[in-house]
Image (cartoon, rainbow, N blue to C red):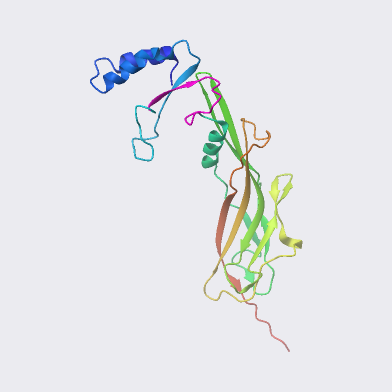
Amino acid sequence: MYTPEEYEEFIKSAYKGAQEPAASYAKKREEEDYHKGDKGLWWQVQFRDDAYNEACPVTPDNWEIWVPQAQPKQDPHQLTPQTLSELAYNSTKLPTPPVELSPKGDQLVVNLGTRVKLDGDFDRVWTTASINYKGVQMAATTVATPVALRIDAGTADADPQTCTYDLVKGDKGYTVDSKDAGCNVTYLRSSGSGTYPFKAAITWKVTWTDSADPDGPAQQPGLPDGLSTFEQDVTVHEIQSVNR
C-alpha cells in the first residue's frame, strides 16, 4: 500500500489525535521511523467486504506489515505467482460441453447406436491474474485444456451405460466424433412415456504459467483438473415392425 514516506504521511494523518490503543500503535511506527531508508514496501490487509470473521482476524501484528525487498525467507503474507495462479483458477469459467446427438435427443431408437459429437468451436480457455502496483509487477495465467468427453446414458438399460472419448485438436479447436468409435451407447429399452437423463462431462487438464502468456512453460505445483457438465432429457422410441 505504501512506500515508507507515504506510510509516514498516512499514519500522521489517520492517527492524529487518536486515543489509546491507536495512539500507541502510531507511536510504535514513529519509533520505527516508518522504515525510511530501507528497501521494501508497507502492505495492508484489504477485504472484499465487511464480513470480518475468525478465519481472517485483524490484529496490530498483521494489519500493516513491512515486507523487505528481495527477502530471502518468504514472508507468509508475501504475494507469489502461485497465489495469483490460484486466484486465476478460482475465476476460470469452463464452457458447457456443446454436445450434439445423432439421432437427436427426442428421436433416439432402441438398439440403434447413439452418435455423439461436439458442435461448433471448442477450445482451451485461460484466465490471467496480475498486479502492477508501486513497482510490484507479477502475473500468472491458468490454462484449461479439454482432454476427454464422458457420456452417461442415464439408465442401466443401455449397452454400455457410459463411454469415454479422447478429444482431438482440430482446425477449430478440440473435437470428437464417435461415428467410428468402438464405444457408442445403445439403448436397450424405450423410455416409454418418460425420458432418460443423458449426461455429458468434459475433463479439463489445468496448468499455469508465471506470466500473462498462456503459452508460457507450465509451472509446478500443478492445479486440479476441471469438469464441465451437460445434461439433457432424451426420448428413446421403440420401432415396431411387421413380419410376414
Q: Nearer the viewer, residue 22 or 113?
A: 22
Q: How many numbered marks appear?
A: 0
Q: Residue at x 56, y 21 (%)?
A: 70
For residue 54, what is the image quadrant? top left
- Rendered position, 92 above or below 5: below
Report whether 35 appears left or right of 183: left
The part of the chain drawn in magenta is 63-78
Residue 175 x %, y %: 70, 51
Residue 234 x %, y %: 57, 66
Q: Nearer the viewer, residue 25 or 159?
A: 25
Q: Is residue 240 magenta?
A: no
Magenta stretch, overall SS: loop
For residue 213, what is the image quadrant? top right
Give the residue at the far top of this rendering: 37
Q: Which image quadrant: the N terminus?
A: top left
- Rendered position, 18 above or below 194: above
Residue 28 x %, y %: 34, 17
Q: Residue at x 52, y 75 (%)?
A: 193
- Rendered position, 40 above or below 112: above
Give the residue at the far right of this rendering: 180
